[in-house]
Image: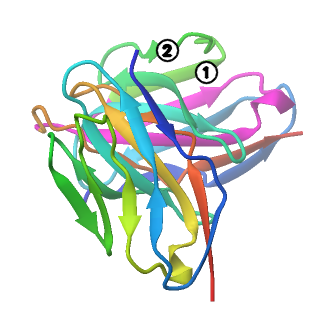
Amino acid sequence: GNSVTQMEGPVTLSEEAFLTINCTYTATGYPSLFWYVQYPGEGLQLLLKATKADDKGSNKGFEATYRKETTSFHLEKGSVQVSDSAVYFCALSGQAGTALIFGKGTTLSVSS
Amino acid sequence: GAVVSQHPSWVICKSGTSVKIECRSLDFQATTMFWYRQFPKQSLMLMATSNEGSKATYEQGVEKDKFLINHASLTLSTLTVTSAHPEDSSFYICSARAAGQGDYNEQFFGPGTRLTVL
């Protein structure tokens, strides 16, 4: 079945450091891929998405490229801020109308 | 746009009582809503998929008689935890998929409901 594997945290960085959170997936067909962010005490928010191979999703300085050859969708940001501290979830959707399948989440902690 | 609300945001109840959680799409029609459960520091686990006007589809291991789901309209789905026990304490999150998305499958999440059963 479909699954998502993302690096376990916590990830602890200093402000302005480079961030990479790895995410790989297993799926049949051509899934859509998502990154969601959950700030402390809040619900999940869509951070970025990509619906086909080689698409690059980007938002708020974060980027992720849908790599079908490596079945990956790694999240990157060139310079993190304290306000980026949150839990990040990689997710995929195999078919329209089906539930999202989530990775276990990666906690990011950024200090000033 | 695309706002999903949940009510209540938190609830504390006694063991053996039932609790109803509402999930509403405020500015769009949701043909499909999903209910997830999130344990502390863990990922979201899908509990069930609910389509408006039909019975919910439950994931393996989820007791449908314990977690009653009703999707009576295109903007409202409810999850009722019946005869709640302390092990049901968790963070329950709903998401909604808007009608007319075609092959696109973006879902919008509610803020979650924290249930504590004493």
Q: Disc 1, disc 2: CB below 8 Å?
A: yes
Q: Chain of mark 2?
A: B
For the record, the magenta segment spans B73-100
Quadrant where the C terminus of chain A lies?
A: bottom right
In this orientation, which residue lies closer to the viewer: A73 or B65? Answer: A73
Provide residue B85's location: percent of width, then percent of height: 83, 27
Q: Secondary structure at mark 2?
A: strand
Provide residue A94's location: percent of width, then percent of height: 28, 26
Q: Is residue B101 above or below residue B59?
A: below
1 or 2: mark nearer the eye: 2
The residue to which callout 1 is attached is B67
> Can residue A100 be seen by looking at this rendering?
no
Colouring mode (rainbow / by chain / secondary structure / one colour): rainbow
Marks 1 and 2 belong to one chain: yes
**Lower position in the chain sequence, tag 1 or tag 2:** 2
The residue to which callout 2 is attached is B58
Q: Is residue B87 magenta?
A: yes
Q: Amino acid at mark 2?
A: Tyr
Number of marks present in the image shown = 2
Q: Amino acid at mark 1?
A: Phe
Residue located 30% across and 36% down the image: A70
The 10 Å Cα crowd at callout 2, few under 14, some 14 to 19, many 20 or more, is: some
| Relative horizontal placement of residue A21, taking residue B105 as reference (left or right) | right
> Can residue B67 be seen by looking at this rendering?
yes
Residue located 51% across and 15% down the image: B59
Q: Residue furthest front?
A: A69
